[in-house]
Amino acid sequence: MLLREFLNRTGEGKAAVVGWGRGMGHKGHMFLASSVLTQAKDTGADPYFVVSRTIGKDDPITPEEKLSIYKRVFPKHGHIFHTATDEMPDLTRVLQQLSKHGYTDVTVVVGADQVKALSYVKQYNGHPDKAGNIPYSFNSLNVIARQETNDPSKEQEGPRATPMRAILQDPNATEEEKFAAWRDAMSPELSDDEVRDLMHKAQQRMSDPSFGKTPKKPKKEKVADESMMGFLAKTTKPAVKKTSTSAEEMRKYFEKEKANELPKVVSDLDKKKIQRVHTRSDENSIKYANKLIREMRAKEFTRQHLSELSVKPAMPIHPELDQHGQGAYLARDVGGYDRVYHMNRLWMAMAMADGKSSGKIPGANASSWSEKYNTIHPFSDADDLKIQAALKTVPSDHGHIAKDHKSKEHDDVNKTSPVAKPKRNKYGV
């Protein structure tokens, strides 16, 4: 099946505007699609929007469900929306197909936080890849944020997927609170029942550890690439079933051998163990070697990753530390991406709590209005121009979230000086 069946031409122009993303299908991603259409209209280009096939705990909505959302929100432009395929799995392959369609100029529109990451596609424009092939050669190839278009939504900060996922995993959140968060984040073109259905599917998939994972291929019983197992002797006699040598025994043997510490006189039992390591015919396979490697790494892997993958501590809390407090908690943000920011939000929420109830704190938000971004506040027109110049110089994920205006004092601020105006005599003194 040819790629053109997955990405049909949407027009007859020489320029194309492409949107690429893997979002949850909320209003922010609708802003992105709208920006693609606006940019294409302003530049006389053909619009395309491709949804990646990424699914998993962080992407619990399937590409097909996302595609259905886009087509509901943009019914007149349903033909521009596509999902990535096995033959066209990434943005590079999408651009390659557009090149085959005859496009000479392409603009990629993405979220502001993805501009830097996806600008890698420029390095392949007119240049060979590792295999020596040139994927595409456009006269111009640009990657811009949706905020750089003239779309009416460019000043709007759309909802973020992280809070949508977090509230589904919050044991203290009620069904009504979860639905309210999702209803507010999703496009009004979707009905309440559709939003609730998507929310329930996402919650179920996020709790399913197998969701999004590729099924394991059946294990091959044949010997695979015996050249990699040269250290194992090859025998032609049928294998005799014996107790497998443990990983610990092998480790001790090879450590002693390396240090030349093996005794000259070896017991019969040790001889059998050593012989078994080197001569068993069932050990002449990748399968058996991988088994030994897994055994040898089991303890180290568990110790190394226990604290990262579990809410239990890697070791018991020290008794003296436990005695001086009234218990202890482990906490981090979902996924462990920014523990410092998460702890800051926890402290702020604790300050708002009354200490009398363990229920959700009224009026407390899971994230601030700026969330994990730094904020810059100009005090003059010159400051504003300096900020704009700096942002154009240093690659940044940025956006203009508040319109320019002169600073204003609050109406309640006293504008009358408490110091009486000095009196002067007729001589002006």
Image (cartoon, rainbow, N blue to C red):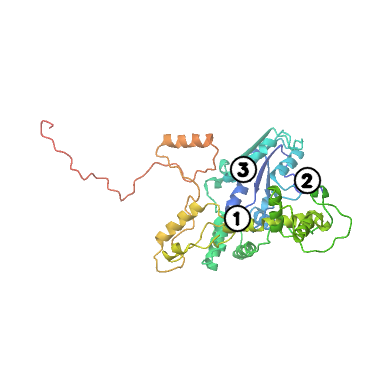
Q: Position of residue 393 (x, y in %)?
A: 53, 34
| N-terminal label among 1 and 2 | 2
- The crowding category of the residue bearing disc 2, from other C-alpha atoms within 10 Å (few below 14, some 14 to 19, many at least 20), is few
Q: Are marks 2 and 3 in contact (CB under 8 Å)?
A: no
Q: Are marks 1 and 2 in contact (CB under 8 Å)?
A: no
The dot on residue 304 is 1
- Looking at the picture, which amino acid does disc 3 mark? Ala
Seen at 34% across and 46% down, the residue is: 409
Seen at 49% across and 55% down, the residue is: 342
Helix or strand or loop: what does disc 1 sit on?
helix
Residue 115: quarter of image: top right
On-image quarter of the C terminus: top left
Q: Is residue 212 left or right of residue 172?
A: right
Helix or strand or loop: what does disc 2 sit on?
helix
Residue 119: quarter of image: top right
Q: What separation in Å lies between label 2 and label 3 (alpha carbons)?
A: 27 Å
Q: What separation in Å lies between label 3 and label 1 (alpha carbons)?
A: 30 Å
Q: Nearer the viewer, residue 264 or 386?
A: 264
The residue singled out by tag 3 in the image is 117
Q: Is residue 154 above or below residue 357?
A: above
| N-terminal label among 2 and 3 | 2
Q: Position of residue 305 (x, y in %)?
A: 60, 56
- Looking at the picture, which amino acid does disc 1 mark? Gln
The dot on residue 4 is 2
Q: Is residue 90 left or right of residue 322?
A: right
How many numbered badges does the structure rendering display? 3
Q: What separation in Å lies between label 1 and label 2 (alpha carbons)?
A: 47 Å
- The crowding category of the residue bearing disc 3, from other C-alpha atoms within 10 Å (few below 14, some 14 to 19, many at least 20), is few
